[in-house]
Amino acid sequence: MFKQSRNLLLASGIALALAGGAAVAGTQSQEVTEARQETQIWTTYALSPYLRANDLQVSVHNGKATLTGKVEESVNKELAEQIALGVSGVKDVDNQIVIQADYSPPAQSAERSFGEVIDDATITSQVKSKFLWSKNTEGFATNVTTKRGKVSLVGTADSAAAKDLAGQMALNTHGVVSVDNQLVVKTPKENVAKAATLEAGHDMSDGWITTKVKSTYMYSTNVDSSDISVNTDKGIVALSGKVGSGAERALAIELAQNVRGVKSVNSKALTL
């Protein structure tokens, strides 16, 4: 009898220990999940140009996100809530964010925020891509840097016209505030005939051209890429759809013409 009682007590102790360990593991797992959810919400706020300047705090417990802080407009409060609800596992939001019309965001620090660093890296990548795709800036020895939307171009250009075009291409990129064009104009090392031969020897596929024209539109501030259809056949680009103005139409044609491999642009179906 004593032996059975002892075995029973031992078994019960092991069961309790295992249950306690499972409870601790479950608590830790829940804490990790909630920390991940908080980080995801905060990161999205930091990346949003509408929310990053606001002093917002986030906490998550048992699938419920609590938001606090101040914003200037109700739309920003609603945006913060919708972002939180979009995170996997968050089922409810206690939105305690205060709307204050005269709210002044914290003063901008000397160091860029996480969102600003991502924005600047995106701008730099877009400008470099546009230079790489353009027949007029191919071969440029250009260093592109961006800080808080201000783009700096350092390097060389084959002509004054090419330098100006590079500046315009950079300025016409989403998020760019200004362009410091420090490109130095140098005399081309190769003559026009050789350059033409090189261009002819580097024909691009129609699919590549179509993709780069569409991407150039997507990166550009003054062209609505969603309203323009692009098709390429043997280097001839056909544009169709509607644009908002004559200036937008002219820019869409110009941007397409500048892409490497484009022989001509048919814009008859691109209407106002």
Image (spheres, rainbow, N blue to C red):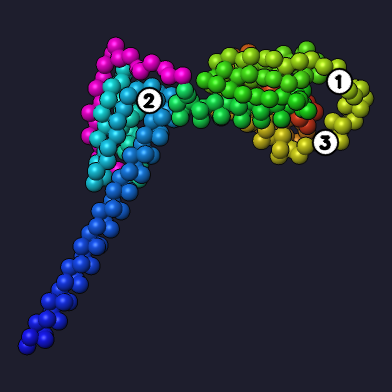
Q: Is residue 59 left or right of residue 248?
A: left
The Cα–Cα distance between marks 2 and 3, rounded to whole angstroms, is 45 Å
From the image, state whether disc 2 or disc 3 is nearer to you: 2
Give the mark nearest the N terminus, 3 or 1. 1
Q: Position of residue 187 (x, y in %)?
A: 86, 17
The residue range painted magenta reads 90-110
The kind of secondary structure element at disc 1 is loop
- Residue positioned 11% across, 85% down in the render: 4
Q: Position of residue 252 (x, y in %)?
A: 66, 21
Q: Which residue is mark 1?
A: 188
Residue 227 visible within the image:
no
Quadrant in which the C terminus is drawn: top right
Give the residue type that dot 3 points to. His
The Cα–Cα distance between marks 3 and 1, rounded to whole angstroms, is 19 Å
Residue 19 visible within the image:
yes
Quadrant in which the N terminus is drawn: bottom left
Residue 213 image label: none
Q: Is residue 52 found inside the magenta-colored segment of the image?
A: no
The main secondary structure of the magenta stretch is loop
Residue 51 image label: 2
Q: Is residue 95 found inside the magenta-colored segment of the image?
A: yes
Q: Which residue is mark 3?
A: 202
- Residue positioned 12% across, 81% down in the render: 6
- Residue positioned 77% across, 37% down in the render: 204
Q: Quadrant of residue 182?
A: top right
Q: Nearer the viewer, residue 129 or 255?
A: 129
The kind of secondary structure element at disc 2 is loop
Q: Is residue 106 left or right of residue 8?
A: right
Q: Position of residue 7 (x, y in %)?
A: 14, 81
From the image, state whether disc 3 or disc 1 is nearer to you: 1
